[in-house]
Amino acid sequence: MSLKKKIETASITRRSFLRWGAAVGSSAAASHKLLGAFRRRDPNHALVEAAPPAEERMIRVGCPSHNCGGRCLLRVHVRDGVIVRIDTDDRPGDTVADPQLRACVRGRAYRKRQYHRDRLQFPMKRVGKRGEGKFERVSWDEALDRIAAEFERIKKAYGNQAFYVPYGTGSYNQINGRQTAQRLMNLYGGSLGFYNSYSWAAISAATPYVYGTGVTGNQRQDWLNSKYILMWGWNPAEMRDGTNTEFFVQKAREKGARVVCIDPRMTLSAVSLADEWIPIRPGTDAAMMSAMAWVMVTEKLHDAAFIKTHCVGFDGTQMPAGAEGAESYLDYLLGTRDGTPKTPAWAEAVTGVPRETIARIAREYATMKPGVLYQGYGMQRRAYGEQPVRAGCVLAAITGNVGVPGGWASGIALQAPDGGPFWLVFPTGPNPVKALIPSFLWTEAVLRGTRMGQADGVRGAERLDTDIKCIWAVACNALINQHSNINRTAGILADEKKVEFLLVQDNFLTPTGRFADILLPVCTQFETWGLEDGWKYGDEVILMPKVVEPPFETKSDYRICAEIAARLGFEQAYTEGRTERDWVAWSLDRYRRTRFPGVPTLDEFERSNAGVYSVPVTEPAVAFADFRRDPAKHPLPTPSGKIEIFSKALHDMNNPAEIPAVPKYIQEWESPFGPEAAKYPLSAIGHHYLSRVHSTMEGVDWLEEAFPQRLFINPLDAEPRKLANGDLVKVWNDRGACVVPCRLTRRIMPGVVALPQGAWWTPDKDGVDRRGSINVLTSDRWTPLAFGNAQHTIMVQVARAEKS
Amino acid sequence: MVTQYAFFFDAAACSGCKACQVACKDRNDLGPGTLWRRVYEVTGGGWEKKGQVWVPSVIAYNVSMACNHCENPVCGAACPVKAIWKREDGIVFVDTDLCIGCRYCEWACPYTALRFHAATNTVSKCDFCYDAVDAGKPPACVAACPRRALDFGDLADLRKKYGDLRHIHPLPDPEQTGPALVLRPHRDAARAAERGAEVANWEEV
C-alpha cells in the first residue's frame, strides 16, 4: 500500500482498541497480587483489533468528579461499549465571560484509570488479619447480608453514634460518593457527623472571624480589573482551584496586572503566571505579612480612612467594648507590648525573604491598587494555619482593597454573591445524631470518643456517647493514606476491638481498602449517572450521563446503598423509587429553582448532548460592595458589623499564645528554629501534584511518566548529602520513613524539600514506605482554633538509600 | 492553500502541565515511553547567600514540542529506505511499514521528534493529527491546552499573527532544518543563556 493511501485509511487501521479488561497500561505502582487470583484470563481479554470498525459515538460528559479543584467538560468517544478516546470542551467562542472548560492532564489520561488492570471486580471479604491485605471473593448476597448484620449488631450494642461515614472525596458528584451512604445512615437513625475538611480547615474557620462569612471572593473575571496580584502560596496551575482560574490570572496579566508569586517552590504557577517569584520559608507567611503591615503603617501607605469607617481593632482608638486595654494590631506591629517591632529585618530572619524585598512588596501591594492578595490553602494546613489567613485578610483591609472591583478581601473567598457552586443538592436528609467532630479528629473518636467534648471541637453535644465502632469509607482513601501519621493510623485500624467493622467501597484496592472487612467494587463515574456544578468557582451545570456499562460485578455507590437499605427494611424510603438517572433529573430541578433558573430538563439536556449549561459572567460580582458603600446600612455579620482586625470572640477564648485576638506569627511546633531541627533539619512540604488528585489516579502510567513520584531537593542540600539526581533517598523523622528517588532542582528553596502528596502507602517488611507517601512523616496534631490538619508542618532528614 | 503547516507555541503562557502530551497519547494510543509531544523544563541560574538569606537568580520556563515538520526535514534525508515523506501541506510522515529501525532519522533530528520502539523495531512521530486537520479540526495538543498556549496553521499565517521567532534557548539553530514553528518567548528566555539554562527533565522527555 502506498503511504498516501495508508494515511488516507490510517484513522481506521492504526488504532487498535481494547476490550474491557485488557491491560492498557502497566500495573499500578502499588502491587495488588491478590487480585491476580480474581482476574479473568480468557483470551478475549487480550488486545484485539476492531474489525469491522463499529460506529463511534461522542458523548459530552463532566470529567469524573474528584476533589481536583476543577470541573471540566470531556468529549468521550465510545465504540462497542468501550471508551476509545477522550478529548475536551470545544464549544465555539471561548470567551473570558464563558470560557471552554478544558480538562487538565488528569482528565485527559482518564482512559488509563477507567481501563486499569487493577480495578476492583468482585465483592471481597477479609480473611487475614486486618490490614494484611488478604481477601477472598464473595457473592454480593453474602457481602450485603454481612453488612446488614454488622450494622444491626453495632446499632444495638452501641447506638447510632458509633457509625461514621468519614470525609472522602474520591467520588464527588451529586449522585456518587459518600453522600449516598450518609443518606442511608440518616434514614437508619443517623451517624456521628463531622465538620470541616482536610483541604481548608483553618481558612474556613478563621475567615469568618474577620468578615463574619466565607463569601469573600469576587467572581474571577473581576481579576481583569486588578493592577496587582499577589499569589501567596497559591498554585492554580497544579491544583487548579477552579477550571480556568489560571487562565483568568493569565488574562489579567496580559491586561497589565503585575503578578508576584510567594511560595517555597518555584511552582508551575510561578513560572507561567508571575512576573516575580519570592521564595519563603514554609510556615512563616504571617511574619512576612506582619512586616508588610509594619512598612505600610510606618510609611503611611495604609488606607486610614477605610480603616476608620470599616474596621475595628486596628489601633487603641477602635477596640471593642470589654477589650479596651487589650493589644491592638498596631501594638503588635510596633512591638508596644512584646518589645519586638515587626520590621522587615525581623521578618527576614524568620522568613528567609530579604528585608528590601519585603518592604518593596508591601509598597507595591499598598500602592498598585486595586490589588488581589490570594491565599493558597497550603499555608493554612499548618501548625498555626489560622494566622496567615487572618493576617492576609488584614492586609486586604488596611490597604482598602475590600469591596472594590479589582480588589480582593482574601480569606477563603467563596464566590460572591451567593457562595458559589460546589454544594450538595442530593438530599442526605437530616441526621438524627446531632454530635459532630472535626473531620481531622476521627482517630480521637475511635480511641477516646466518650472522653471527647467541646475542648476537642465536639459540636452538637456535650460529649460523645460512644467511641466510633463502625466506619463506612466510600470513595475515601483519606482514612489512612491522606490522614496524618499513617503508621499510627494503621495501628488504630488494625485493632479489631476498636473499629469493629470497616466497610470500604472504591474502584481500586487502596491503602484504605487493605484494612476493609468487606471491600465492595464500585463502578466509575463514566459507568453511572451523575451531575456536577463548578468546584469552588464557576457558573455552570455539567451533566454526567452514563457512557458505558459497569464492568464485572461493579455497582454504583447509590445502587449498593439501595441494596443495603433493602436488607435493613427501608429500600423505598431510600430510593423513593428513583434510579440514579431519576436523581439527576431531580437535582437538575433543584438547580433550576436555585442558582440556574435556565437549566434544561434532563431529557432536553441529554438530547442536545451539550454536556454543560453555563451562565456567562459579564459583570462579575464583587464581595462586600454594599458594605463598602454603606457600612451602617450593610453591616458585616461580625459581632461589630465591621471587619474585625481584632476579634473579641477570639480574645475571649483566653488562649493568646495559640489563638491571639489579632493575627500574629507564631513559631510552629516543628520548625527550623526549634530543637528538633538538630535531628531533622529540612522542612518538608507535600504539594499537590499533577499526576494525581490527592491519592486518586495513582498508578496511571501516562501520568507517572509525565510527573514521576520523587523528592524535590535543592542542589545545595543534596551536595552535603552526596546525592545525585535520581538517587534513591530515605526521608524520615520520628514518625516514619519512606524511600523514593530524588530530583535535584533549583526551583525549591534551600532547607526545604517537597514530596508530592497522595502517593499510595506501600510499606515493606520493615514498615518503610517504598512509594513516597508523605503521610508516614506527617503529624496528627491539629491546629488550635479550627481543629484542622497541619500536615505541612513537618521536619525531616534525608540521606541516600540503598535499593531493598 | 496551506503549503507548510506549523505549530505556534507560547512559552510565556505554558505552565508545563503536559495536557498536550497526554492528549496526544490518548489520541494516538501511545504507550508509556512514546512521546510524540513532550514538554521540556528549562532551568538556569542559582542561589547566592546574601547576609543571612539565600537569594535566587533561578529562571525557568517550558518548551512544549512535537515534530516541527521542518521545511528541510533532515530526518527524511537520513532515511536509507525513504520511509519519511513530506506531504504537499508540509506535514512530515513516517511510514512504519517501510521503516527498518536503523534510527538514523532519530540521530539526525535535532528536536528529538522521532521515537524508537524496540518492540516493533520502528520509529514514529507526530503526524500533525493530519486526519483531524484535513477535517478542519485542530491537532489534539492544540485543542487541549488549558492555557491556550498552542496554535496551528500555515506557517506564513502564523508569522503574520505572532511574529517570526523560531528559536529560544536552548533549542537548536533553526537554520539546520527550518522548523515550521513560531514561538513567543517567556520573560526568562532572554537571560537563559547567560544563566546557563538547560533542559532539567531529560528523564521525562
Image (spheres, rainbow, N blue to C red):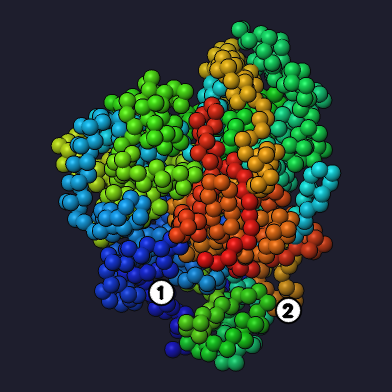
Which residue shows up at 32% across the image and 52% down it?
Answer: A129
Q: Position of residue A366 (x, y in %)?
A: 75, 30
- Where is residue A706, by image quadrant? bottom right
The answer to whether residue A341 is above or below residue A668 is: above
- Residue at image position (39%, 78%) is A13
Q: Which mark is residue B176?
A: 2
Picture layout, residue A462 above or below residue A527: above
In this picture, residue B102 sits left or right of residue A258: left
- Could you say which is closer to the camera, residue A541 or residue A639? A639
Q: Quadrant of the N terminus of chain A?
A: bottom left
Name the one closer to the observer, A672 or B34: A672
Residue A457 at what x, y percent from top left?
45, 26
Disc sitting over residue A528 in the figure: none
Element marked by disc 2: helix
Instruction: Name the outermost residue toward the bottom.
Output: B80
Residue A15: assigned label: 1
Chain letter for mark 2, please: B
**Image point (71%, 69%), residue name:** B171
Q: Position of residue A562 (x, y in %)?
A: 21, 43
Q: Say which residue appears at 19% left-offset and 55% top-offset.
A: A139
Query: Could you say which is closer to the camera, residue A644 or residue A569?
Result: A569
From what the image shows, is residue A769 above or below residue A287? Answer: below
Residue A523 image point, x, y percent: 31, 54
Q: Looking at numbered disc 2 in the image, what kind of residue is underneath it?
A: Gln
Kindly report the distance in space between the C-alpha atoms of the residues bearing marks 2 and 1.
34 Å
Residue at the limit of the structure toward the right, as seen here = B51
Three-letter code for the amino acid on which mark 1 is drawn:
Arg
